[in-house]
């Protein structure tokens, strides 16, 4: 089994990523760390705890991480995920609280104490991962790979920047420049995973509590994507990080250099994806180009049926 740490800001698609991961016998979730992003840190952490209850991840540590980006002012995304960060379904109050340890310290502790290399799945702003790498650079040696959702050749928060990278560009730069093998699910590929009405119908045919909640999450998420972007269905961005670990054959990837703009007047948080090798900079990432969309939804539906 692969040992993973999920660093997230649930968030509808972050929640789906946890739900997909928890259903995979080949994945061992060592811990879940949260970051401010889609909503303020207390909210994203409560949401993570609620999802853990839903899928019975009672023994997985949940640690609250960074409440603010490294240097910039915080911005959250209630227009996309609602005020709670996870609007739509009604969840019971979480059965437990978060750990006392800061999320970045949990990452450090879990990576250091694991006898096998650990894969980190960041699906929010990269603040916690950057903090962990700054405080304990030696953890690099025991990180197998970082598989993250962020960036792309176009934007969704500014004309050129994607939300997770835009929210903390300095942290993203630290991660991309770290030398750790990095795999990137950017908007180019995540927009190929739209939860359309047909997908939601399929989810709603599954008769269990988890599928019911997922259906409600997708309906809410689709409504804001319709309003903000006029999309027919919401892209379930973050889930692709988990899907890649269990079914890499569904993904067409390309080795590229990715640089993060931290200074631009209009372009802070933009990822420069050097698809054609024009920069001369060394390859530092695998970038998602194309998804087998049907295969992906099959994987998702099969996972939901297991609950
Ligand atoms: C990313 O931003 C958040 O809204 C989603 O959870 C995803 O991680 C997409 O840009
Ligand atoms: Ca997210």
Image (cartoon, grey):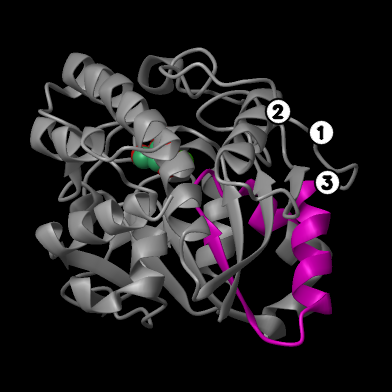
| Residue occupying the point 67% across, 28% down | 46
Mark 3 / mark 2, whichever is N-terminal: 2
Residue pointed to by mark 3: 102
Is residue 144 shown left or right of residue 248? right
Q: Is mark 2 on a helix, strand or loop?
A: loop
Q: Where is residue 2 in the image (x, y as percent from the top left)?
A: 55, 78
- Residue 120 painted magenta: yes
Q: Give the range drawn in magenta.
A: 102-131
Disc 2 marks which residue? 94
Residue at image position (52%, 57%) is: 22
User: CA–CA distance between discs 2 and 1?
Assistant: 7 Å
- Judged by depth in the image, the label closer to the viewer, 1 or 3, is 1
Which residue has dot 1 on it? 97
Q: In which quarter of the image is the N terminus?
A: bottom right
Q: In this view, does 65 lie above or below 104?
A: above
- In the rendered structure, the answer to whether residue 275 lies left or right of residue 144 reads left
Q: Residue furthest front?
A: 207
Residue 39: x and y in percent read: 56, 24
Q: Do the residues labelled 2 and 1 touch (CB within 8 Å)?
A: yes
């Amino acid at each position: 089994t692969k040992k993973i740490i999920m660093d997230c800001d649930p968030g509808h698609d972050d929640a789906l990523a946890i739900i997909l991961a928890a259903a995979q016998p080949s994945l061992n979730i060592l811990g879940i760390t949260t970051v401010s992003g889609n909503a303020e840190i207390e909210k994203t952490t409560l949401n993570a705890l609620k999802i853990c209850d839903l899928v019975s991840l009672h023994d997985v540590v949940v640690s609250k991480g960074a409440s603010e980006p490294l240097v910039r002012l915080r911005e959250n995304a209630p227009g996309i995920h609602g005020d709670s960060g996870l609007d739509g379904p009604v969840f019971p109050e979480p059965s437990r609280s978060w750990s006392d340890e800061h999320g970045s310290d949990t990452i450090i502790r879990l990576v250091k104490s694991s006898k096998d290399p650990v894969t980190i799945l960041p699906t929010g702003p990269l603040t916690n991962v950057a903090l962990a790498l700054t405080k304990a650079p030696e953890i690099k040696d025991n990180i197998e790979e970082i598989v993250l959702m962020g960036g792309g050749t176009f934007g969704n928060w500014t004309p050129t920047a994607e939300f997770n990278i835009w929210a903390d560009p300095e942290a993203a730069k630290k991660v991309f420049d770290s030398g750790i093998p990095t795999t990137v699910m950017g908007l180019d590929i995540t927009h190929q995973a739209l939860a359309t009405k047909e997908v939601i119908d399929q989810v709603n045919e599954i008769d269990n509590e988890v599928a019911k909640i997922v259906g409600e999450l997708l309906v809410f998420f689709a409504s804001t994507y319709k309003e903000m972007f006029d999309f027919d269905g919401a892209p379930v961005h973050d889930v692709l990080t988990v899907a890649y670990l269990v079914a890499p054959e569904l993904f067409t990837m390309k080795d590229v250099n990715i640089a993060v703009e931290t200074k631009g007047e209009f372009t802070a948080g933009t990822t420069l994806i050097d698809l054609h090798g024009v920069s001369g900079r060394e390859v530092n990432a695998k970038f998602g180009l194309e998804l087998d969309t049907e295969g992906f939804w099959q994987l998702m539906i099969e996972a939901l049926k297991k609950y």
